[in-house]
Image (cartoon, grey):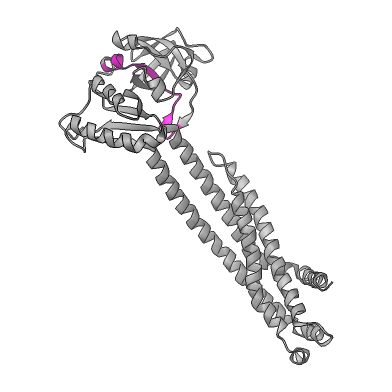
């Protein structure tokens, strides 16, 4: 009965001063909504970066010969020999360039890659129609090509390009396969490209030797071991450890995740300061409320109200202000997250764990910052309180 009466009196006090109560809760609302917004956007960005790096392959190592040693490239045979290293499941040498592709009246500037048949397994690229490149295509330097779905749309519209001819920098190639859609990664669109046999690309792009290749490991756990073995083999082959660079997507993912997590935590901490400020605002208003209601407190104590009754009333009032502010902040924060999600170029993720934490924190603020004014009210002496105007 006492608890119900204390709740009723606390609610009447809050409702009786609507504007003051709202302004008191404003700091909590801003703090909670800011924390939810910042953490949700940060988590969404982190997931997007991780997905894009994962698209590069967490079981892949990309090797680039940068030409600081005596040798500036490897032969195809040397490159493919690294497939014998323990933990390696495939090697894919690549020669890259750009060409102007034409089909009747349509043309487009497209990235071109000269590849081996192993590219299909290593890079997980498969055809949706036609066939992939074969060893015989490389052996005889056949002018055949695989075309990405985006490039096919540019040059052929809705037609099936398989079996049709295409002109690359003026040379005619026959399209033998249409690649499946792969989407985009940090390296750009995986669907806007043309693949031709590696041996054909050497002559077509007038490039001799391999300066870039990728190694696929049997599992992501094998990456450190394979990387160490590969470093030793490349240093021996090129004569200079600075003549090559090994890119490990997994290391980059971990680094980006740590950086993003640190940034999100920093921003959330800054936003969390608003919660502390809001708590100080609640304490300040509660102290003002105690001073305004000194005579009321004296009358209640004179007719038998205990110290615990007064303490409970003001504690409930403080907790109600902070938790209501927390709930309004959660609603505002989720609404802002939805609005931001309409404008950013990646899927938004709601930080539901932060919603729970923010609500618990706002409740705790009501308790912590309500203790001082509630205790002040409970300790007022009835005689002093009744003498106050």
**Residue furthest to the front:** 86
- Residue 99 versus residue 366: which sits nearer the camera? 366
Left or right side of 35 for 8: right
On the rendered image, what quadrant is the N terminus found in? Answer: bottom right
Residue 108 placed where, x, y %?
41, 20
- Asked whether the viewer can see residue 358, the reply is yes
- Residue 256 versus residue 305: which sits nearer the camera? 305
Where is 241 relative to 109, above or below? below
Left or right side of 95 for 347: right
Where is 110 relative to 42, above or below? above
Tell me the residue at 63%/71% (across/down). Answer: 368
Residue 45 placed where, x, y %?
50, 44
Left or right side of 163 for 358: right
Residue 116 placed where, x, y %?
34, 18
Residue 312 is drawn in which quadrant?
Answer: bottom right
- Asked whether the viewer can see residue 109, the reply is no
Tell me the residue at 45%/7% (across/down). Answer: 163
- Residue 224 versus residue 180: which sits nearer the camera? 224
Tell me the residue at 28%/26% (across/down). Answer: 82
Residue 65 is drawn in which quadrant?
Answer: top left
Numbered label tally: 0
Residue 27 placed where, x, y %?
62, 64
Left or right side of 378 for 261: left
On the rendered image, what quadrant is the C terminus found in? Answer: bottom right
Which region is colored magenta? 185-202
Where is 21 relative to 66, above or below? below
Residue 28 is drawn in which quadrant?
Answer: bottom right
**Residue furthest to the left:** 70
Task: Let me know if residue 250 is in the magenta part.
Answer: no
Tell me the residue at 62%/53% (across/down). Answer: 355
- Residue 354 versus residue 290: which sits nearer the camera? 354
């Amino acid at each position: 009965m006492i608890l119900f009466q204390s709740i009723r009196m606390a609610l009447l006090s809050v409702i009786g001063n609507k504007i003051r109560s709202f302004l008191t809760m404003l700091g909590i609302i801003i703090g909670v909504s800011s924390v939810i917004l910042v953490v949700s956007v940060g988590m969404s960005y982190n997931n997007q970066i991780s997905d894009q790096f994962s698209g590069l392959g967490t079981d892949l190592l990309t090797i680039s010969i940068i030409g600081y040693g005596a040798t500036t490239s490897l032969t195809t045979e040397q490159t493919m020999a690294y497939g014998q290293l323990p933990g390696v499941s495939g090697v894919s040498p690549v020669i890259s360039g750009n060409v102007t592709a034409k089909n009747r009246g349509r043309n487009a500037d497209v990235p071109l890659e000269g590849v081996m048949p192993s590219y299909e397994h290593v890079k997980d690229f498969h055809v949706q129609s036609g066939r992939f490149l074969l060893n015989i295509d490389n052996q005889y330097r056949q002018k055949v090509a695989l075309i990405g779905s985006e490039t096919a749309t540019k040059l052929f519209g809705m037609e099936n390009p398989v079996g049709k001819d295409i002109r690359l920098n003026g040379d005619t190639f026959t399209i033998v396969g249409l690649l499946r859609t792969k989407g985009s990664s940090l390296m750009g669109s995986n669907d806007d490209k043309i693949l031709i046999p590696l041996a054909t690309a050497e002559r077509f792009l007038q490039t001799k030797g391999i300066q870039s290749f990728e190694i696929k490991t049997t599992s992501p756990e094998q990456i450190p071991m394979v990387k160490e073995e590969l470093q030793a083999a490349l240093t021996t082959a090129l004569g200079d450890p600075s003549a090559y660079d090994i890119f490990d997507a997994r290391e980059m993912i971990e680094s980006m995740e740590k950086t993003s997590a640190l940034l999100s935590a920093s921003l959330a901490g800054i936003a969390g300061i608003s919660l502390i400020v809001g708590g100080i605002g609640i304490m300040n208003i509660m102290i003002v409320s105690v001073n305004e209601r000194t005579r009321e407190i004296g009358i209640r104590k004179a007719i038998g109200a205990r110290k615990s009754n007064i303490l409970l009333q003001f504690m409930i009032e403080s907790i109600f202000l902070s938790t209501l502010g927390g709930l309004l902040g959660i609603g505002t924060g989720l609404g802002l997250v939805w609005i931001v999600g309409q404008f950013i170029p990646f899927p938004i993720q709601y930080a539901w764990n932060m919603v729970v934490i923010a609500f618990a924190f706002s409740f705790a603020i009501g308790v912590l910052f309500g203790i001082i004014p509630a205790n002040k009210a409970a300790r007022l002496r009835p005689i002093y309180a009744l003498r106050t105007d």
